[in-house]
Image (cartoon, rainbow, N blue to C red):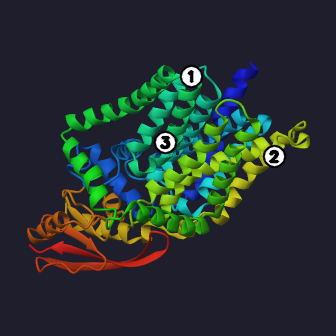
Amino acid sequence: MKDGKTRLLGFAWPLVCAALALLFASTASPLYATNFWTDTNIYFTIGRGMLKGLMPYRDLFDHKGPLLYALYGTGAALCSRGFLGVWLLEILSLAALLALAQRLSYRLGAGPLRYTAAPACAVTVCCCRAFTQGGSAEEFCLPALLLGILCTLRILQEEKGREKAAALFGGAAAWVFLIKYTDCGLFFGLGFFLLLCVLRRSGALACGRVLLRMTAGFAVPVLLCALWLLACGALAECWQVYFAQNLFDYSGAPMSLKGHVLNALAYLRTQSAANPALAVLTLIGMAGSAGALLRGGRGALAEALAFPAGAGLLLLFCYWGEMAHPYYALVFAATACAGVSFLLALAAKIPAAVKGRMPAVTAAVLALCILPACRCCCTAVPLLGVRREEMPQARFASEMHALSDAPTLLDLCSLDQGFYLAADILPVCRYFADNNLDTEEKREAIAGYLADGRCEFVVTVWRTLPENYEAIGSAVGVFDLNDQRTYTLWRRRE
């Protein structure tokens, strides 16, 4: 009975903490008029399109991984007229991260203090500036990144069950690879040292078995995804967009390895200043892993080096190119959660901290602090006052449906700014938004859409359209963290 209650608490408690934190942190929450972020609107438009047979890359262009669009398609299946389904998926994702933080805390020796990991990590993740408005690719990568750290510790510390942990490690790497492969650096650093440790401890045969399980854990989900894309006729386009164009068209000017390292260190400085809690807790995690040298034993050196190596390669891969956005740093919330777990393990060595009901009281107090902390610190909070009916998206949707029985739309406002969702319209153009990849193919395609009047309506911010379109209205609205913009609605001349 006690084990059953412990397991229930292990799942339910992180779920409660995640829901409380995301109530204010994510603009997908019912408290907000909509999710205001351009990137999440792109993902959701593609997710809605997938429910109608459209495919990412082939029919609707964007350059994130296929698993992210599948997640947003699931969110759209739960609720296609708003972000409620996506918000529920965010809660599940964050709850998984918090549950893993509890598990890691217990493994490190936090004992009853492990339940404080959930509220502490919820605030750490959601109150950092890198979280922005929620729903990012990085956010959905976090549980897999922390799972990689947990599996590494299990393999290094135990021989029993290490092949199962290795398969989970590979599966976690595949999850991140299929969402945003530049966030896979952590697995390379962790994987190198855990394989080296197994090789020295148990020999080449055991190391080969662990490597085989890691490879299988990675390959199975990747191959299943590839078969799905192949069956839907989008595998070649996925390869071209997600890999080739991201590598060669999005990363900026070519640099030497030294240039990439210096570039990553420059972003380390700026993003550490913007997200000090993530930086400090990651350093604590590194110090905690180095503590394995004090404990001694087999594998201590590998355990001490694996975490810093993984964090370092995560930094290098994440900031490999010149272009970087504030939300890129959110992946370090996983290493920060590991830092929280090391702190709790250290606190558990103080007898007063684990005496009587003190751990439960501490966890409850931290949970009560989640709502006020997120209300005060989350970057999305200023958008709480925006009313949906006053937004240009809602006003233009009414105008389009009043003028046309089956309106078609092209949103050229720089990324997808929610006009498709507000008007309940699916794109009819592959380049349905003016995305960050500024290729000649995209420019020619958009020019062709406008020249032949592909869409009855077009929304712009700064662009002037050809003579076959006339402006029929304008509106000023807030979008993407209080950025005021004047939108223009154009209609094709008959």
Work out whether mark 3 precedes mark 2 in sequence or the reverse, and give the earlier one.
3
User: Under tag 1, what secondary structure?
Assistant: helix
Identify the mark at residue 10; answer none if there is no mark: none
- Amino acid identity at mark 2: Thr
Residue 471 rendering spot, x and y as whole percentages: 22, 80
Q: Nearer the viewer, residue 265 or 348?
A: 265
Gap in angstroms between the C-alphas marked 1 and 2: 42 Å
- Amino acid identity at mark 3: Phe
Q: Residues within 10 Å of mark 1 (few under 14, many from 20)?
A: few
User: Under tag 3, what secondary structure?
Assistant: helix
Identify the mark at residue 187; answer none if there is no mark: 3
Q: Nearer the viewer, mark 3 or mark 2?
A: 3
Q: Nearer the viewer, residue 418 or 287?
A: 287
Q: Quadrant of the N terminus?
A: top right
Q: How many marks?
A: 3
Q: Residue at x 25, y 46 (%)?
A: 238
Q: Nearer the viewer, mark 1 or mark 2?
A: 1
Give above or below for 283 relative to 414: above
Identify the mark at residue 202; answer none if there is no mark: 1
User: Under tag 2, what secondary structure?
Assistant: helix
Task: Tell me if label 1 and label 2 are in contact, CB under 8 Å.
Answer: no
Q: Residue at x 57, y 28 (%)?
A: 200
- Amino acid identity at mark 1: Ser
Q: Give the residue pinned by disc 2.
A: 362
Residue 112 rendering spot, x and y as whole percentages: 79, 35
Residue 362 rendering spot, x and y as whole percentages: 81, 46
Q: Residue at x 25, y 53 (%)?
A: 244
Q: Is residue 425 visible?
A: no
